[in-house]
Image (tube, grey):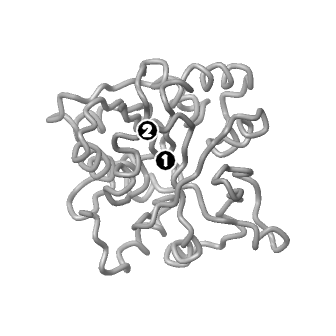
């Protein structure tokens, strides 16, 4: 299985405070991107692509001891979004592929979900305890969270729209920034992206477009620790959380 790590953006909301690429934030003396790579290697994922853009040499320097990393530069990172970066990686992939944001932290169990999987459908892990996480991040769910609705057969029905008082009870969880693309779907994804003709699609918007085009997307619950570093407040609030075990 391949792993594509999305690390091209500048992350303007937090850069002024940390003065480095967001994926280089260190938790327990280990950068976010290396946390993900270490977990992937534990499950014998050796084919790893890192999509860079803003200050790529900072990331290359951080990972200089890892010879197995293939760096792909998104030289259009200022005018494109993470979907475009994902497509750059998928064009290089012929295997089942896991795509991940790099401003998140989670345990090894996400990789365990997909380890030696024979799943032939695009699959998204999600958390059900999202309100607890948003509370720890001190985020207003109506400003920051998005819809995530799953049917009784674990198929994704909707993602990426605004949450309000009317639809709050229908929300089943939240997208983690991780998505599994089986090899049989790679060409379909690339073709769909080209047909949408929008290089600024948010990832959840892209997934929603796939659903509307009758592309089946399965969902699987992830039941361990997850956290996102969207802004500096997230970093400050993370330091207040106790009893986090990322080694599981």
What residue does disc 2 label? 98
Residue at 21 percent of width and 28 percent of height? 68
Position of residue 180 measured from the top left corner of the image (x, y, whole percent): 49, 40
Instruction: Give percent across and percent down for residue 62.
Output: 23, 41
Q: Quick check: 51 left or right of 30?
A: right
Of callouts 1 and 2, the N-terminal one? 2
Q: Is residue 72 left or right of residue 233?
A: left
Extreme residue toward the right, this view:
166
Q: Quadrant of residue 200?
A: top right
Quarter of image, res 92 = top left
Callout 1–callout 2 Cβ contact below 8 Å: yes
User: Residue under circle 1?
Assistant: 178
Q: Quadrant of residue 98?
A: top left
Distance from disc 1 to disc 2, alpha carbons, whole Å, reads: 7 Å
Residue 79, position as x, y percentages in the image: 61, 30
Q: Please, what secondary structure does the residue beneath circle 2 have?
A: strand
Give the residue at x 68% y 58%. Answer: 148
């Amino acid at each position: 299985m391949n792993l594509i790590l999305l690390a091209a953006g500048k992350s303007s909301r937090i850069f002024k405070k940390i003065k480095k690429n967001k994926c280089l934030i260190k938790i327990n003396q280990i950068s976010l991107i290396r946390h993900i790579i270490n977990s992937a290697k534990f499950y014998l994922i050796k084919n790893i692509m890192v999509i860079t853009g803003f200050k790529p040499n900072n990331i290359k320097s951080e990972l200089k001891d890892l010879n197995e990393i293939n760096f792909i530069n998104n030289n259009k990172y200022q005018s494109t979004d993470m979907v475009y970066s994902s497509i750059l990686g998928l064009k290089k992939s012929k295997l089942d592929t896991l795509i991940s944001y790099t401003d998140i932290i989670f345990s090894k169990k996400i990789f365990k979900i997909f380890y030696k999987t024979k799943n032939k459908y695009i699959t998204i892990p999600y958390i059900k305890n999202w309100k607890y996480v948003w509370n720890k991040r001190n985020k207003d769910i109506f400003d920051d969270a998005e819809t995530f609705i799953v049917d009784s057969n674990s198929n994704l029905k909707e993602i990426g729209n605004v949450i309000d008082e009317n639809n709050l009870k229908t929300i089943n969880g939240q997208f983690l920034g991780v998505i599994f693309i089986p090899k049989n779907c790679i060409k379909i994804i690339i073709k769909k992206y080209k047909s949408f003709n929008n290089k600024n699609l948010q990832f959840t918007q892209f997934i929603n477009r796939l659903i509307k085009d009758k592309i089946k997307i399965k969902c699987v619950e992830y039941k361990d620790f997850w956290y996102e570093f969207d802004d500096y407040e997230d970093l400050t609030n993370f330091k207040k959380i106790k009893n986090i075990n990322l080694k599981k």
